[in-house]
Amino acid sequence: MFKKTILLSVASLMVLLISACGDNGETQSEATPVAVQTAKLETPSEVVTERSLGVIDAAKDYHSLSNPDQVRVTHIALDLTVDFDQKVMRGTAAIDYKKINSTAQILILDTNDLTINKVTSGGQELSFKLQSGDSFLGSALEITLPESDARLVIDYATSPQASGVQWLTPVQTAGGKQPFLFTQAQATHARSFIPLQDSPQVRVTYEAVIRTPKELLAVMSASNDPDTKRDGVYEFNMPQAVPSYLIALAVGDLEFKAMGERTGVYAEPSVLEAAAAEFEDTESMLISTEKAYGPYSWDRYDLLILPPSFPFGGMENPRLSFITPTVIAGDKSLVSLIAHELAHSWSGNAVTNATWRDLWLNEGFTTYLTYRIMENVYGTDRFKMEAVLGYQDLEQDLNTLDAGDQILAIDLRGRDPDDVFSNIPYEKGALFLREIEHKIGRDNFDVFLRNYFEKFAFQSITTDQFLEHLKGTLLVDHADKLSIKRINQWVFEAGIPEAAPKPSSDAFSIVDVARTNWLAGKLSADAIETEKWTVHQWLYFLNNMPEAMSDANMTALDAAFDLTNSKNNEIAHSWLLMSVVNWYEPALPRLHEYLTSIGRNKLVKPLYRELSKTAEGKALGRKAFEQAKPGYHPLTVKANEGFMK
Ligand code: BES
Ligand code: ZN
């Protein structure tokens, strides 16, 4: 996609800088004059692509139609009724705002598939215009502001097809008796259930009254009272300003169980005990992260276990991470997901990416922190295994993605961020930070991170702002060990720089030996000593098999280890993928069952992609997809329907 990278001329760089940031460190698109000498940036943050989109404005959010540079929303008060029969939410969003430009008369909000009934202020109707829609950006809602600058109240309803809401019927839940609803706002889906400025550089406080059938419980990414009366009217308050993608709601037959002083879990009753046992180390993770990176800012840290259709592994909704049930393995083998979502409380929820181009600031820092938390809580051996597996995921993406999509500060203009999800911001971002750690020493880097989280807390920052910060800190203090040239290479170029850190694990060496000997016919499958193998060793064993496997070898592995029936969803995924590639028929009924019972995109998408490559695969895939589709989340449908056409 990117054929050439051209450095910006100094003149255009200055224009860009001038619009990049204000003097308080907050991102602002509004032109704020800054001293010209700061334009001596060496950061080639702009590339000219063959798509001729021109220079990237680093501070501009290309994924919002709203106008926070003119008028900025500061607080949202929701009063919504959840109607499971119609699959809609109806009610009001009261909006407080401040004028950045004192002469501004129009507030522009993002919406997608919303019906806007009326907009009032102090009881007076205001005129508004809902522009026609765009495929993923939605429709701009332009409201003519009242002279008084008073609070606006928008009367609206969501659509049953809202991209950020999933409505589940009782049979799609664990309990089977009550319906369930959950929202997933990241990256651009908050606008499908709230009219707001749907940009990560706009932070709002919020409050909500959520009205539900009275046997159900509502929870939000806000203050949740575990002892609240179950009466169908639930009140929430989020006093800390958060970006829109962190506003979240779930409603269902939920119960709560405490895990520690500040940590607990919400889940359907039949899942609650298993979840609380699986994630019992959450409190230790929290304490360990605070010790290294400073106090936890969000009061409680609870988990919400979603039904299996949840399209992600986890989502870091503040105070209440949303978690897939597919990681409840019975042996804590997949709990790094919890470390990850918890780590976002620092990297992401406190310090937030200003635009989706800067996602790596959220996910790369969080992935780095995840490894550190796992090392602290579970030891170095486990961390090393997980780091190797993460590195291999990265290598796979580097082998398949276009050069442009291998860049940390990615150009997403004109593209739906959902379509560009990869390991690059995660694992390449983490590796970049690991290199800095290795070069300057762990203690120094921890001090840097702690200060970074403190300095930028509750702000949304761009990649350029981060690099400016590096230039004023580590690049001065460790000028002998770090160079801006190398850092720019990490951030603005494809691939991994030469001589980057490469994780390794002794625990995997014995697995390599076993695999090699078995493949060479020197060892039969049942003679491999696997009794003490961890889930990670199994994943490494399977993921590094040759692409083409004989039927005899697939059969031998399955006979020795019953992989087709593995209860671990990650092991089952690796095995089923091998089974599709090699068309190992005994595993195909299990594949159908897997695809129709799990909606987590990371687990199902590679299977559909592989199935789409042959006629027989496509037939099997289509059957599963059609059966599963009514229960899949809109994002999972969107990500996979192309393969099954
Ligand atoms: N915030 C992400 C999920 C996300 C990213 C949603 C971008 C929409 C757009 C979450 O923290 C995450 O990274 N989840 C991963 C967890 C994994 C890397 C441990 C997932 O769901 O697989
Ligand atoms: Zn994440």
Image: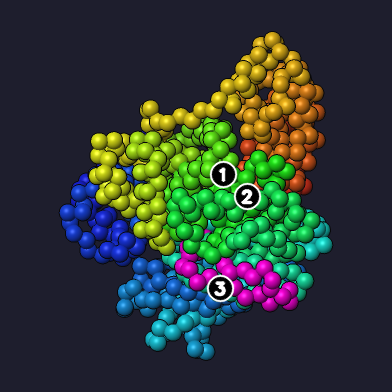
Within the magenta stretch, is there residue 96?
A: no
Q: Mark 1 and mark 3: span between their CA atoms?
A: 32 Å
Q: Position of residue 208 (x, y in %)?
A: 59, 74
Please count the marks in the image. 3
Q: Mark 1 and mark 2: span between their CA atoms?
A: 8 Å
Q: Which residues are magenta?
A: 222-245
Q: Quadrant of residue 601?
A: top right
Question: Mark 1–mark 2 contact, CB under 8 Å?
Answer: yes
Which residue is label 1 attached to?
A: 377
Look at the image and tell me in which quarter the C terminus lies. top right
Which residue is label 3 attached to?
A: 237
Q: Earlier in the sequence, mark 3 or mark 2?
A: 3
User: In the shown orientation, is residue 120 left or right of residue 408?
Assistant: right
Q: Earlier in the sequence, mark 1 or mark 3?
A: 3
Numbered badge on residue 281:
2
- The residue carrying mark 3 has its beta carbon less than 8 Å from ligand 1: no
Amino acid type of the residue tagged 2 in the rendering = Asp
Residue 641, relative to residue 220: is it above or below? Answer: above
Label 1 neighbour load within 10 Å: few <14, some 14-19, many 20+: some
Q: Residue furthest bottom?
A: 123
Residue 325, relative to residue 434: is it above or below? Answer: below
